[in-house]
Image (cartoon, rainbow, N blue to C red):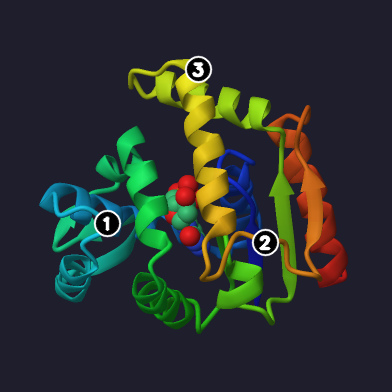
Amino acid sequence: MVIAIDGPAGAGKSTVAKYIAKKLGFVYLDTGAMYRAIGLKVYEDGCGVENTERVKELLDDSVIDIKYVDGTQTVWLDGKDVSKEIRLNHISKMASDVSALPFVREKLVSMQRKMSENGDYILDGRDIGTVVFPGAELKFFLTASVEERATRRYKELIEKGQQADFDTVKKEIEQRDYNDSHRKTSPLKKADDAIELDTTGLDIDEVCARIEKEVNRVLGK
Ligand code: DC
């Protein structure tokens, strides 16, 4: 079984996906982490996303591995654990930029489908319900106001000890929303059959409870 959770940055997708995965014994696959790994590779090379020939070479040379350590997803790039580095704020923009390139999406989508072939998976991203698994048994589209998403992201960065300025975080989120929903290939979009949930004003326990209710309904529990 596949559960798809899509939506913009900071809508609560990963927290909900982790919670449901644990509760139901599903494997959680954070697809954004894979775009972040390629973003990191391009950032470290310094070639710039516009240099698509070089990005293609880097992509062909990249070995991305997702490993689960005590049930937590870790991301490996060319044999190195980059789980922490890919969360740095400047990598978010790079990830969004590389994710607009069709050849990057082609490779990562194919990996995502292969990885989730056998067993029960919950995936979060931008195109899971529309492109990666259009036939997913259950699809959610989480949203929240920009203000709220920026507040969540700002707190997260501060908690991780990263430098952050609220207005800058908010602008970056707006920019990323725009990029992700206006790109030509697989833009961020709600699947027609996805259940939409606006998480503005809800705390994470409330969001998880609502999603869990829907999951149980579909599973007939
Ligand atoms: O979910 P995230 O913020 O870690 O994702 C980083 C970027 O990767 C996001 O701005 C857009 C891109 N992405 C995507 O295009 N498709 C996905 N399925 C997941 C992420």
Query: As drawn, is 46 to the left or to the right of 211?
Result: left
Query: As drawn, is 151 to the left or to the right of 81?
Result: right
In the image as oriented, which residue stretches furthest toward the front?
Answer: 50
Q: Which dot marks residue 166?
A: 3
Q: Is residue 3 above or below residue 159?
A: below
The residue drawn where x is 46% and y is 61% is 31
The answer to whether marks 2 and 3 mark residues whose Cβ atoms lie closer than 8 Å is no
Q: Is residue 70 visible?
A: no
Amino acid on which the number 2 mark rests in the picture: Lys
Q: Which dot marks residue 49?
A: 1
Task: State whether label 3 is within 8 Å of ligand 1.
Answer: no
Task: State whether label 1 is within 8 Å of ligand 1.
Answer: no
Amino acid on which the number 1 mark rests in the picture: Val
Secondary structure at numbered mark 1: loop
Query: As drawn, is 196 to the left or to the right of 61?
Result: right
Q: Nearer the viewer, mark 2 or mark 1?
A: 1
Identify the residue under disc 2. 189
Residue 217, percent across and down? 87, 64
